[in-house]
Amino acid sequence: MIGLHEVAKLSGVSKSTVSRVINNEYGVKASTKEKVLKAIEECGYVANQVARDLKSQKTNLIGVIVPTMSSNASAQGLNGISQVIESVGKHVLLANSQMIHEKEIEYIKRFNQKRAEGILLFATHVDAELVETIKQSTVPVVLIGQDGSLFNIPSIIHDDLSVGFSAAQRLVEAGASNIGFIGVNQQDIAVDQCRFQGLQQYLQHTKKGEPLFHSRGEFTIESGFQQTQQLLLDWPQLDGLFCATDRIAIGAMKAITAAGKIPGKDIKVLGVGNDELAEVCTPTLSTSSYAFDLTGKKAAQMLLELIANKQTEVSKLVMGFESITRESC
């Protein structure tokens, strides 16, 4: 297999110089770069692709940063992204931030170093550090799931406020009058704050009072279970529960059952996301469904337009949702 040694020997330079040319580093003379590129072209198909990328300044790589590989939102979103990106001859570079905000920052910088042509970020939240990192990026960045438009960052978001508003209406119409909310980290504007605000606004608008509580946990079934165990002790009058995600809601129903109550009868429960587990848990979970696959496609299309300089204004697209009624509400 052809390596740096053969390219260096053919071009008459050191291996370190070949490496600097391949990585497009500063400080290599134009004449030297030309010799190395010529040698690369003579070394075979793979090296020839590197040469073409260097000459055109295109890598055909799109960086995608997800918060977790196991979520329904990430899986479906990636499916939509991949279809669009691959249809135009480009390829996805995938990074998993593991819900760690610092890793999102790190991967944006790393994708810039790898000369990705653009970046799609499923952001956990938006803060000053993230905004500054995106501003310093040499390639366009599109946020998915969090609104960065106030900072002139292109974004595609879900209508989380309306989802919360709808959830409150559904719970009240199902007979609930003492309604609580289990969210996540308060820095997550979309999943925690917007969904709670929608719930609160409906209750205020219809003069039903305030939510009993705004609890916060993690994006897991176990967290939903633990949160609800304590909440049932603190709020025995609870008869309606809105959870920020389906997995939290599934854990909550488990805790309700363990406490001797019946989810869907004694306490109405709603989630968000239409996770595949929502159809197989007992009782089946009522929820709100987002078009994650379509969201991924729209985000990829938005990014490709930015790469092609076809967008002159910052874009924000708000995606709708569908209410799914099952046994829990």
Image: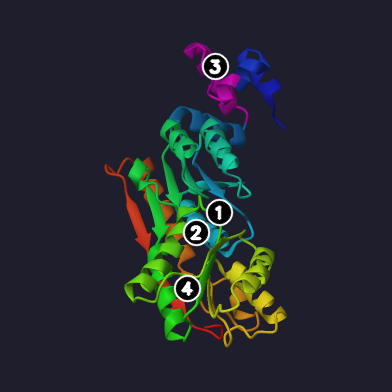
Ranked by sequence position, the earlier of labels 4 and 3 is 3
Q: CA distance from mark 3 to mark 1?
A: 54 Å
Residue 164 in magenta?
no
In the image, 138: left or right of 102? left
Residue holding disc 3:
35
Residue holding disc 4:
288
Q: Amino acid at mark 1?
A: Asn
Task: From the top left corner, tell me how far across and down residue 48 is, in percent.
Answer: 56, 32
Q: Is residue 43 above or below residue 200?
A: above
Residue holding disc 2:
192
Mark 4 or mark 3, which is nearer to you?
4
Mark 4: few/some/many CA within 10 Å (<14, 14-19, 20+): many
Magenta residues (range): 20-43
Asked if the residues shown at circle 1 and circle 4 are in contact, with their CB atoms under 8 angstroms apart, the answer is no
Task: Find residue 185 and name its label.
Answer: 1
Task: From the top left corner, tell me how far across and down residue 247 is, in percent.
Answer: 61, 68
Q: CA distance from mark 2 to mark 3?
A: 56 Å
Query: In terms of secondary structure, where does tag 1 sit?
Result: loop
Ranked by sequence position, the earlier of labels 3 and 1 is 3
Nearest the camera: 104 or 62? 104
